[in-house]
Image (cartoon, rainbow, N blue to C red):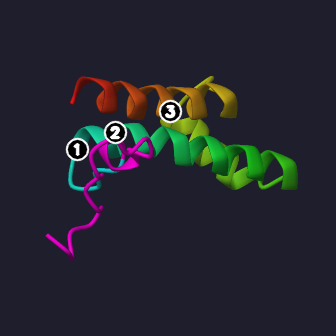
Amino acid sequence: MADEFPPAAAPGDTADWHKYYRPKSVAWWASVTPLILGVILAVAQAFGWAPVIHIIDTFAPGMGPAVLVNLGLFGIGLRGAIK
């Protein structure tokens, strides 16, 4: 299908990123959310945005940006490996 998004990989294509990008999947969103929160938390800490830090700490108490980013990357990678 020519207008398929994400485009299907050609046989032997090593750039098989489409198996990791599935925005219609709840599991994908459950993995992307901590990844995005980790990036936002790192930026918020760098610029001193205390309200944003407090809101994210409410949803993920005691987790730093590195933990959240790694948790998201792990979930995306695990889902891609299983599927």
Q: Amino acid at mark 2?
A: Ala
Tell me, yes or no, whether the highlighted magenta stretch contains residue 35: no
- Mark 3: few/some/many CA within 10 Å (<14, 14-19, 20+): some
Question: Could you tell which of marks 3 and 1 lies nearer the N-terminus?
Answer: 1
Q: Amino acid at mark 3?
A: Leu
What is the quadrant of the N terminus in the image? bottom left
Marks 3 and 1 sit apart, C-alpha to C-alpha, by: 15 Å
Foreground pick, 51 / 8: 8
* Residue 16 visible to an observer of this rendering: yes
Tell me, yes or no, whether the highlighted magenta stretch contains residue 15: yes
What SS does tag 3 mark? helix
Task: Name the residue rendered at 29%, 55% in the picture.
Answer: 23
Q: Which residues are magenta?
A: 1-20
Whether label 2 touches label 1, CB < 8 Å: yes
Foreground pick, 80 / 1: 1
Count how many numbered circles sit on residues in the image.
3
Q: Amino acid at mark 1?
A: Val
Task: Name the residue rendered at 21%, 47% in the picture.
Answer: 25
What SS does tag 1 mark? helix
Q: Quadrant of residue 26?
A: top left
